[in-house]
């Protein structure tokens, strides 16, 4: 595989040919979780960030680290704790002795990597969580009035534990909205768990062989944005997101009854962008409504806030998205 592409079209052809190899390499260390892996690959080729929600011990950290190896990207893991400060994430200015005297210099934090794992992000206060906002949106950080660009491509993959809520700080809606997908990592079926236990208690796993590099990923991201999409499909994505907002013109009655806050504009943007990447990974050069429907739950589940009435009736965000899809056929 060459380091650069002669044309961006080659990026599409190479991905089509390498899709099976991508899965094969990941299967060396990751068993099962097919849907999660598929959506993570879509996020990588779309340039989006991901939130992974799941109980401890489900290989969330291993999965993200394996992705960085698969794409030959630099990787940093940040363990979010209650005493973590913003400077511990972004870096800070320090006074340094030089031959010509003292001067202030910037020491980069762990966020200066291609792929950053924000582990248990909801265990740190909002002030530190907010340190990620500028990086996720603008791909740079500001310290002492100076802007420092982050390496490209840049991704934040964050994990949170839905079980232990004591001592946690819920992510504000503004930060949740920066994540393209919220992926639920669930327990494996019995056969897959048997395979995991057998593999992890045997010899060392086979090393993952890189398939793409950063330049190739950026080339593919440009190709994804050029995929044609019919206005009707874009309108479908916009209406799907807009119908989740209570007290608006097109909101169904169940939205007004159960939802206190709906999805914003970024939801429709991510539905369309993810749909373009999904079309190409499926070997198609155009987006169909089924691409939008397939991505509805990972895109909307963290952007829709149910109210107390819905909780009392046992209504979940997933069931609300199902009803939205039925109402927007």
Image (tube, helix red, strand yellow):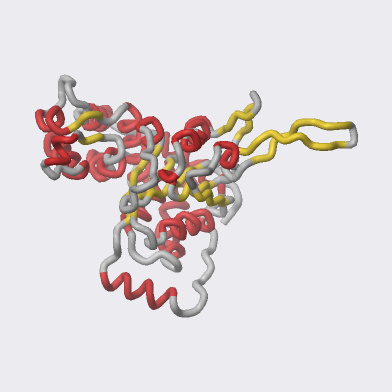
Name the residue: 56% across, 56% down.
1
Name the residue: 35% across, 30% down.
266
Residue closer to the observer: 161 or 294: 161
Question: Where is residue 93 drawn, in percent x and y?
Answer: 69, 33
Residue 271: name its quadrant.
Answer: top left
Question: Tag count in the figure?
Answer: 0
Q: Name the residue furthest top.
A: 249
Give left or right: position of 120 versus 94.
left
State whether residue 282 is above or below residue 313: below
Question: Where is residue 299 drawn, in percent x and y?
Answer: 31, 40
Residue 327 showing in the rendered view: yes
Residue closer to the observer: 46 or 97: 97
Give left or right: position of 204 versus 39.
right
Q: Name the residue furthest right.
A: 99
Name the residue: 48% across, 33% down.
127
Residue closer to the observer: 262 or 293: 262
Question: Where is residue 120 drawn, in percent x and y?
Answer: 43, 49
Residue closer to the observer: 121 or 199: 121
């Amino acid at each position: 595989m060459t380091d650069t592409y002669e044309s961006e079209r080659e990026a599409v052809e190479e991905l089509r040919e390498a899709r099976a190899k991508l899965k094969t390499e990941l299967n060396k260390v990751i068993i099962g979780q097919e849907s999660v892996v598929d959506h993570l690959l879509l996020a990588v080729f779309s340039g989006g960030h991901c939130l992974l929600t799941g109980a401890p011990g489900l290989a969330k950290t291993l999965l993200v680290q394996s992705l960085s190896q698969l794409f030959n990207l630099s990787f940093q893991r940040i363990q979010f704790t209650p005493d973590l400060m913003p400077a511990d994430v972004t870096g800070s200015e320090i006074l340094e002795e030089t031959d010509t005297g003292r001067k202030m210099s910037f020491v980069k934090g762990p966020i200066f990597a291609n792929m950053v794992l924000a582990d248990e992000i909801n265990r740190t206060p909002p002030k530190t969580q907010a340190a990620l906002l500028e990086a996720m949106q603008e791909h740079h950080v500001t310290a002492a009035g100076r802007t420092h660009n982050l390496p490209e491509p840049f991704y934040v993959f964050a994990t949170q534990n839905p079980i232990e809520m004591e001592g946690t700080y819920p992510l504000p809606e503004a930060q949740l909205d920066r994540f393209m997908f919220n992926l639920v990592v669930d327990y494996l079926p019995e056969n897959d768990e048997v395979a995991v236990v057998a593999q992890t208690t045997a010899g060392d796993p086979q090393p993952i062989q890189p398939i793409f590099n950063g330049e190739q990923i950026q080339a593919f991201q440009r190709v994804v944005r050029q995929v044609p999409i019919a206005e009707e499909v874009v309108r479908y994505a916009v209406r799907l997101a807009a119908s989740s907002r209570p007290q608006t013109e097109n909101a169904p009655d169940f939205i007004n009854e159960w939802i206190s806050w709906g999805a914003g504009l970024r939801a429709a943007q991510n539905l369309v962008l993810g749909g373009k990447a999904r079309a190409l990974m499926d070997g198609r050069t155009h987006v169909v409504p089924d691409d939008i429907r397939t991505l509805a739950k990972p895109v909307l589940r963290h952007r829709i806030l149910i109210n107390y009435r819905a909780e009392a009736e046992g209504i979940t965000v997933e069931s609300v998205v199902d009803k939205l899809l039925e109402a927007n056929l």
